[in-house]
Every structure is written in structure tokens, then in C-alpha cells.
Image (spheres, rainbow, N blue to C red):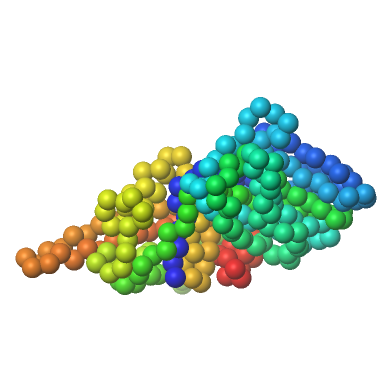
């Protein structure tokens, strides 16, 4: 099944620590930004309750996220905790209750997860933890969004393109060209759907496939969505969705063509191919 997120309520792409406040309770550490793309929490010593976290916004300040969890129902996140320190993510609600969306854990590779948020709450803060021991914990992003849209079908096909980039250089008198490796282009996923099959409306939608009008319209303020093809998972942008309406005089065939392009703030050579394309999720 193919799914896509939509309707951002709050996003941190972990490229700035502005607004994040640290709390040390036994663990002593610091947070910084790596590759303009990831938070790295470095724990230098661990004792007592062995807890360290950063929260957004400041839990002692006047501002809050103030997100209605009945409207914003899902949180996505990506983390790496491949040493002794453990990752953990917690939401703090306005009534002082909390929800642990990622329990204390370690991982030898980047991992992504999501959780449905307790309904009827107001989300005020989010916490990223590095607990239990000295070491490093990385966070790539956290996204609180309205929901996940499941494609009723990809009846006209789905293809994933993973293009390496080469320069083919002709040399005078040489037999054969010189091939220069220039890295890799962003991967693309092309999906072609039959709008006449299945339910393409969310609650309150006027037309089939309206979620993609929503995503396209809000691209100016939503840097990426999370795409799950059923085999791969990664951040993407939606590029030029096309709705075809083809009539033969008796009925109208409606085809939705979508192209998703891989999104990343930094070079993906810092990850394995399994981590980059979410093949282990």
C-alpha cells in the first residue's frame, strides 16, 4: 500500500537548535547541528536518573505549540542511537499529561517511526531524549501532521528511479569516452492512479484526489512529505501532479499522475542505501 502524509501542524527538520531548551537530570551533554540536517545530542557523563532531553518550545516559557490533537493526529520521526545512549520522544500536553511516542531504544541504523496522537488533547511541547549512558543520539526530523492518506490504487503503475549521475567526456583520438562519477541525482517515484476505482476523498473533500491539491497548494510552507511505497520510505516533494480526464462520449476515464522527488538537506553519502531509501522500515 502506498501512503503519504499531509497537513503539517509542526515540523522540525533538525537544522537549527533555536527555540530548543535542554534539561539535564543526571546525564550531562550538549546538542548541536550536523551537516545542516541532523541534531546530535552528545552525552559526556551519565549518573543519577540518567536523563537528558531538549524540548521545544521552552517548557518554562510563555509560548506553546498549541496544536489540537483531534486535528493533528499523527507524528513521524527519524532517529539513530547506535551507542550506549538511548533515544526517546515524548509529547507534552497542555493538561501536563504526556505521551511517549518513541520508547527508550537504540538502533544501529537510521530508523523511522510514527504514532497516532491521543485525541482530544492540546500538544504544547515535544522532547527529544538521550538517556541511560554516555554516547550520541541523532534526530533527523519530527513532523506532526493531520494524517496519512492511503492510495486506493496505483492501477496504472508505479516506478522508482534511482539515477546515478555520470559525465560522459569525449576525448579526441580516444577509443571510448571517459566516464566521470558525479554522485547521484535525487530519486524519483512516479505513480499513475485510476480515480474511478476506490474512495479518493477524505472527510470533507469536494472532489476525488483533493489531498494532492492540498499538498501542492501548501508546498510553499511544507518542505516535504513522508512517502511510503510499500517497499521504500523517504522524504519527498510532490512535483506537478496531473489529472487526465478522457471521455469517449459514454464515460470519462480519470487518471492521476504523480511524481515525487527525494528531499534532503544534506548529501546522502552519510547514510547507507538501506537507510537512505528506508528499505529496513
Q: In the figure, 125 relative to 135: above or below?
A: above
Q: Residue furthest right?
A: 47
Name which residue lies at 60% across and 42% down: 123
Q: Please state if 120 lies on the left or on the right of 28 as rendered.
A: left
- Return the x and y of residue 221 as percentages of the image width and height: 46, 39
Task: Classify residue 121 by image quadrant.
Answer: top right
Q: Nearer the viewer, residue 63 or 158?
A: 63
Name which residue lies at 65% across and 55% down: 101
Q: Nearer the viewer, residue 274 or 107?
A: 107
- Return the x and y of residue 2 as percentages of the image width and height: 44, 67
Q: Nearer the viewer, residue 250 or 61?
A: 61
- Return the x and y of residue 251 as percentages of the image width and height: 12, 67
The quarter in which the N terminus is drawn is bottom left
Q: Nearer the viewer, residue 26 or 83?
A: 26
The quarter in which the C terminus is drawn is bottom right
Name which residue lies at 35% across and 59% down: 258
Task: Classify residue 260 by image quadrant.
Answer: bottom left
- Return the x and y of residue 142 as percentages of the image width and height: 60, 49
Q: In the figure, 66 relative to 4: above or below?
A: above
Name which residue lies at 53% across and 64% down: 233
| Residue 26 shows in the view | yes
Q: Please state if 4 lies on the left or on the right of 90 as rendered.
A: left
Q: Residue furthest top?
A: 62
| Residue 75 shows in the view | no
Amino acid at each position: 500500500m502506498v501512503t503519504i502524509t499531509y497537513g503539517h501542524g509542526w515540523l522540525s527538520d533538525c537544522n537549527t537548535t533555536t527555540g530548543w531548551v535542554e534539561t539535564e537530570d543526571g546525564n550531562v551533554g550538549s546538542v548541536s547541528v550536523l551537516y545542516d540536517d541532523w541534531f546530535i545530542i552528545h552525552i559526556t557523563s551519565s549518573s543519577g536518573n540518567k536523563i537528558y532531553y531538549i524540548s521545544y518550545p521552552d517548557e518554562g516559557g510563555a509560548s506553546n505549540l498549541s496544536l489540537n490533537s483531534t486535528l493533528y493526529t499523527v507524528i513521524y520521526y527519524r532517529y539513530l542511537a547506535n551507542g550506549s545512549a538511548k533515544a526517546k520522544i515524548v509529547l507534552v500536553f497542555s493538561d501536563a499529561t504526556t505521551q511517549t511516542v518513541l520508547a527508550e531504544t537504540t538502533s544501529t541504523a537510521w530508523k523511522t517511526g510514527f504514532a497516532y496522537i491521543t485525541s482530544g488533547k492540546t500538544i504544547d511541547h515535544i522532547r527529544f531524549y538521550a538517556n541511560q549512558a554516555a554516547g550520541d543520539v541523532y534526530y533527523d526530523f519530527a513532523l506532526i501532521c493531520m494524517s496519512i492518506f492511503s492510495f486506493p490504487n496505483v492501477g496504472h503503475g508505479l516506478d522508482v528511479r534511482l539515477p546515478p549521475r555520470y559525465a560522459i567526456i569525449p576525448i579526441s583520438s580516444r577509443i571510448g569516452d571517459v566516464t566521470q562519477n558525479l554522485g547521484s541525482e535525487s530519486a524519483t517515484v512516479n505513480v499513475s492512479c485510476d480515480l474511478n476505482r476506490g474512495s479518493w476523498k477524505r472527510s470533507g473533500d469536494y472532489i476525488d484526489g483533493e489531498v494532492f491539491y492540498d499538498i501542492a497548494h501548501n508546498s510553499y510552507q511544507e518542505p516535504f512529505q513522508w512517502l511510503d511505497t510499500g517497499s521504500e520510505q523517504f522524504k519527498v516533494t510532490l512535483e506537478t501532479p496531473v489529472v487526465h480526464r478522457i471521455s469517449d462520449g459514454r464515460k470519462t476515464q480519470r487518471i492521476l499522475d504523480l511524481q515525487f522527488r527525494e528531499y534532503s538537506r544534506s548529501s546522502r553519502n552519510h547514510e547507507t542505501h538501506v537507510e537512505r531509501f528506508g528499505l529496513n522500515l
